[in-house]
Amino acid sequence: MATLYLVRHGQASFAAENYDRLSALGRQQSVWLGEYFAERGIVFARAVCGTLDRQRETARAILETMGSNLAAEEHPGWNEYSGEALYKAYLGDEWARARAKGDVRAVYRTIKAALEAWSDVRLPGSLPETWHGFGARIAAAMHSACAGLPDDAVVLAASSGGAIGRGVADMLQAPARAAIELNLQFRNSGFCEIYFSQRSMRLVSMNCVPHLDRGDRRDAITYS
């Protein structure tokens, strides 16, 4: 079977002026993942990523560490939902004040509630996309990444937690709440293994961080 490695980006720059870039730890997580793939003799036939900087940087660090000549093909279908738009829609006029506090737990609780409201079509105002539209573009990106490849091909896709959670949940025909839980529990540089063919996709493993699961790297397991 052909294999898709669906990777969440390394740690981004939470609470910084520009969240959409890898932190120093995020770059290191991506390098360690590249080393893990290289040590196992994995050779990617195709690499893809979203158009967000944290996704591009993750894919680039993995491939460069592996000594691969591939450049990741950018596809906006892999992009994350607009967390800021959901945050604003859920909190209304209070969103700027809440964001300024920089409380990680409060942000977590709020974005979870906003995602649930989004999936239930309860958020007011216009949003960049619907919950249904989000799922449709992730499914299209997954199939595009795997299209036209031989039965033994291996594909790398660097994306984000929400996109991965939605893609996996929909593949398993799980409800929206499952997609949201997967989103919020996905670890930086964690990956899913998916077997694919022209007819089907099957989840083999999920949210794996073997490159971080060792005594001297346990502090490198992050979620932002």
Image (cartoon, grey):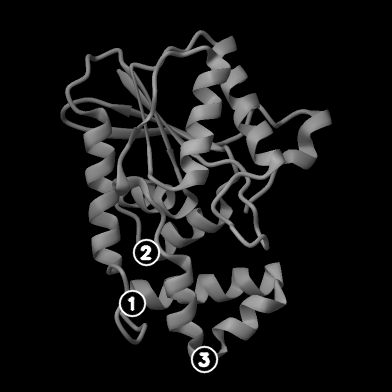
Can you name the residue that lies furthest to the right here?
A: 216
Is residue 206 in sight in this rendering? Answer: no
Residue 195 location, quadrant: top left
Above or below: residue 166 compared with residue 158: below
Q: CA distance from mark 1 to mark 2?
A: 9 Å
Vertical side of 213 occupied by 180: above or below: below
x and y, in percent, of residue 146 in the image: 25, 29
Q: Which mark is residue 176?
A: 2
Q: At label 1, which amino acid type do we have?
A: Asp
Residue 32 horizontal/vertical position (percent)? 65, 25
Q: Which amino acid, by three-letter code, is at mark 2?
A: Ala
Mark 1 vs mark 3, foreground winner is 3
SS at mark 1 in the image: loop
Residue occupying image coordinates x 63% and y 85%: 97
Residue under label 1 = 120
Q: What crowding class fits label 1: few (fewer than 14 Cα within 10 Å), some (14-19), or many (20 or more)? A: few
Q: Earlier in the sequence, mark 1 or mark 3?
A: 3
Kind of element beneath mark 2: helix
Check if mark 1's residue and mark 2's residue have beta carbons within 8 Å.
yes
The relative height of residue 173 versus residue 180 in the rendered view (above or below) is above
SS type, badge 3? helix
From the viewer's perspective, tell me whether residue 145 is left or right of residue 86: left
Give the CA distance from mark 3 to mark 2: 27 Å
- Count all numbered tags in the image, as a single digit: 3
Q: Earlier in the sequence, mark 1 or mark 2?
A: 1
Q: CA distance from mark 1 to mark 3?
A: 21 Å
Q: Which residue is mark 3?
A: 93
Residue at coordinates 56% horizontally, 38% vertically from top-left?
190
